[in-house]
Image (tube, coloured by chain):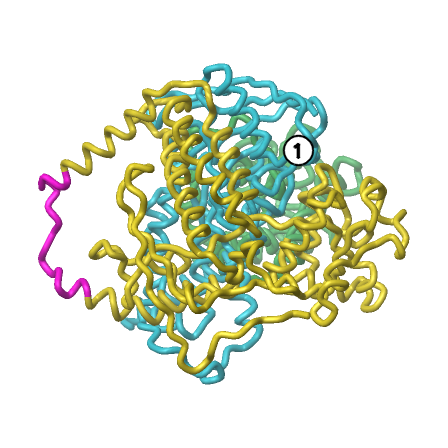
Chain colours: A green, B cyan, C yellow
Amino acid sequence: MIVAITGIILILFVIGHLLGNLQIFLGPDWLNGYSQHLRDLGPLLWLIRIFLLLTVIIHIYVTIHLAIENRRARPEPYIDKQYAKATFASRHMVMSGLIVLAFIVYHLAHFTVRITDARFALLRPDSLGHYDVYSMMVYGFQSYLVSGFYVLGLFLLALHLSHGSSSFFQSLGLNDKKLTPRLAVGGRIFAWLLFAGYTSIPAAVLLGLVKPAQQL
Amino acid sequence: MNFRLRVWRQPNAKARGKLVDYEARDISPNTSFLEMLDILNDNLLGRGEEPIAFDSDCREGICGVCSLTINGEAHGPDHPGAVCELYMRKFRDGATIIVEPFRVRSFPIIKDLVIDRRALDRIVQAGGFISARAGSAPEANSIPIPKHDADLAMEAAACIGCGACAAACPNGSAMLFTAAKVSHLSLLPQGNPERVARVLKMVQVMDAEGFGNCTNTYECEAVCPAEISASFIAKLNREYARASLRRGAGE
Amino acid sequence: MSESLRNDGRVWVPKRKEDREKAPGEIPETDRDYYLERKYPSYGNLAPRDISSRAAKEVCDEGRGVGPGGRGVYLDFADAIKRLGKNVIRERYGNLFEVYEKITGEDAYKRPMRIYPAVHYTMGGLWVDYNLMSNVPGLFVIGEANFSDHGANRLGASALMQGLGDGYFILPYTLPNYLAGQMGKRPPDDSPEFHKAEAEVRARVKKMLDIDGKRSLDSIHRELGLLLWDKCGMSRHAKGLREALVKIPELRETFWREVRVPGNDEDFNQSLERAGRVADFLEFAELMCTDALARNESCGAHFREEHQTPEGEALRDDEKHAAVFAWEFQGDGQLASPKLHREPLHFETVHLTQRSYK
C-alpha cells in the first residue's frame, strides 16, 4: 500500500515532468519562461523537491524490504520455472527500478546540478534574462551517448510503469474481475505513451528538428 | 508413449535433494500423470529401489493434496486443473518432463515430492471460521443474501487449499489463498461479526509464516486449479485497509 | 461422472455383441438397446443408482459393454442436444463435459460418453450411540464415518447433509456434554495400557517391514479389490460370498508372508502407511462379506441375487432382518471372528413397503 501511494505520487510527477519537457516543441521562450516560473517558486520548489526525494526514498526502502522478504520466502529456487501469466516487467520491478534510479541520479547531475557537461556554464541568458534551458537540453541531447542512456533509462522506466501503473489499483483494492484486465492494458498503453513522449525530445534533437537557440 | 522423467529426490527434510532420471515406457496417452508415477513406482519397487514419494488423495481435483511442479508450472501445463487432472496425452511422445515439489520456504519438503503445507492450516486457524453457534436451522428466507454476494462467496469457497498460488508466485506469496478464505466468509452475513478481527489475524499469521509479498504478477490465478480470481486479492487489500482503519479508530 | 447427467442423457448398449467394437455413430437406432428405458418404462434413465448400476454391470457381463475392456455403456446426449440445443446442455453440464474431455480426450457433445459404475462410497460405518460417540469412550464419529443415516443409495447430498447435520446440530451439544466430565483430566501416557498399545503398534510395524517378500502392496490391494467387486459388489449371492470368505484369509496370509514394504519406520514412509491400510482393508473386507452373508435378504444396495421379486427388485425379509447389524471387533484375523449385535429397527409413522420403479 505504501508502495502504491508513493508510486502514484511518482507517476504524477513523471506526467507533470513530461508535460513540462514537451514545451520544448513550443520554442525557447515558452520553455525558458516555464523553467524560470518553476525557479521563482523558491522555497516551495525546494519543498516539492524534498517531498519527491522522500517519496523516492520510501518507495525504494519499502520495496527493497519486501523484495528481501520475497527472496527469503523461496530459499531454494526451481530448477525449471515457466510463467503462465506473470509478465517480464512484473517479475523484474526491482531490477528496472534500480536502473531507473541510477538514471535519475545521472539525469539530475546532468540537467539540474549540471556538473557533467562544462558547456552548460557557458550558456548566456536568453533575451528575457531567463536561463536558456532550451539550448541546454538541445546541446545535452546532441550527444548520441547521452541520448542513448536517456532512452535506455526511459525504456526501463516504461517497463517499470507498464506493470506499476495498473498494479497500484490492485494494491489499493480498487479492482475487480472486469476491471483488472482493462487496467492492465491501460497501464501498458500509458507507460509506452510516456516512453514515446519522453523519447520524442532526444529523437527530435538528434534528427535536427530542434536546434539550439544560441551558439556556443 | 515413452517419457524421460527428471524427478526431484530428497530422502528427508534435512538432506540435499537432486534430480534423478527415470524412463517411463509404454504409457497409454489415457494415463493420468499420477497413474504414470504409480506405474513408475511399481517398476522401481520391482527393481528393489525406493518408490518416489508424492502426495495424492481423491484424484478428482477436489481434495487439494497433489502438489507437483511439472516443467516449471504448478500442477503442470494443463490449466485450470490439479495434477491429478493432468493426462499424459498433453505431452509429446519422447518428451523430457521435470518434476519438482512446490518450492516455498513455508512448505518444507518432507520427502521427495511431499511437502508440509500446515502453514496454510495455521492461516485458517487464525480466523477462517465462524465462532457463533449455528443453533438450529433458521428459516431460509430470514437472512436475505444478494445473489451477487452468494455467487462471489461460492467462487472464493472453491479454493481447495493446494498452495499452488504460493508455489507459482515469483515471490512465494500466499495472498490468493488467504484472500479466498477471507473473502468467502466476509461476504456472508454469518461471517460479518468477526470480519475485522479475521482479516487482521489471518494476514498477520500469513506474514509470520514467512510467505512472500504480493507484487500483482497474477501468476497465482493462472495456475489455480479452482480458478480463484486475483481480484479477491484486491478485495483482501480492501478488507485489510478497512479493518486497519476501524481498529485505528478505536473500534 | 456425475449422476446428474442421467437427467438428459440416454443410456444404451448395442443389441448384439458383434457391434460393441463399432463407432457409436455407425450403430443404427434399431440396433441399440436403451435397456433402462426398456426395463423401467416410467423412470427410464432416472432409475435409482443401485438399479441402474446393476443394469449396467449386467449388460457388460453379457458381453455387450463398449470401449476398451468392454466395461462401459453409452450415455448419449444427441437427443437432448437436438431437443434443447447445445447451449442449454452446456449451461447445465458444461463443467462435467470438460472433465470428461480432460479424462478421455473425447468431445461428449459429438460422441456419447462411456460410463461404468464404480465403487464410490460404502454404506455403513462405525457404530455410534445417540450422542454420536462410539463404544470407545471419548471417540466421537461424525458424518459419513458413522453408520447412522444411510439409505439404499448414498448420494452426494446425503453425505453432505450428514456431515452438516452432525457437525452443526448434534456435536455442539453432545461433545461439550462429554468434555464437561473430563475437565482437568489428562489421559496418562505412562500407564501400562498405553505402553501395551505402543508396543503392539511397534511390533506390527516391525513385522510389516521385516517381511521383505516379492509381492507389491498394489498387487495385493488390487487382487482384494477385484475379489470384492466380483463377490461382494453391486449384486452378491451366498455362494460367491462363501468363496470370498475363503479367499480373503488366504490373501491375508499371502500379505503377511510375501509383501514387500520398502523403507524404514524412522523416516516418512508412504509405503508403510499404505501397508497399514491394506492390512486393515483385508480385515474389513472379511467383515463386509461376513455381514453380507449374514443378512439373508436383499435390502437397498445390498442385493442378494437369490432374494428378488419377479420384477428384479430387492426382496426384503422384514420379519427376520429389520435390524442394524453391528459387529464388535474381537481382534485381528480368523482367530477371533467379530461378534454380532442386532439392533432392531422400529418404524412408527412411515412403514416399510416394497419399492417399485416400473
Q: Looking at the image, which residue is at 85% across and 64% down? A: C82
Q: Residue at x 52, y 44 (%)?
A: C239
Using the rendered image of the protein, determine whether residue B245 is visible from the camera's viewpoint.
Answer: no
Look at the image and say whether residue C45 sits in the magenta stretch.
no
Q: Which residues are magenta?
A: C178-194
- Which residue sits furthest top? B47
Dominant secondary structure of the residues highlighted in magenta in the image: loop
The answer to whether C23 is drawn above or below residue C134 in the figure is: above
Chain holding disc 1: B
| Nearer the observer, C312 or A98 | C312
B128 on left or right of C188: right
| Amino acid type, residue under disc 1 in the picture | Met
Question: Badge 1: few (under 14), some or many (20 or more) residues near its Cα, within 10 Å?
Answer: many
Tell me where residue B194 appears, x and y as whole percent.
34, 69
The residue shown at (62%, 41%) is A84
Q: Quadrant of the C terminus of chain C?
A: bottom right
Q: Tell me the residue that label 1 is attached to.
A: B88
Asked whether A76 or C38 is in front, the reply is C38
Q: Secondary structure at mark 1?
A: helix
Q: Say if B227 sits above or below C355 in the image.
A: above
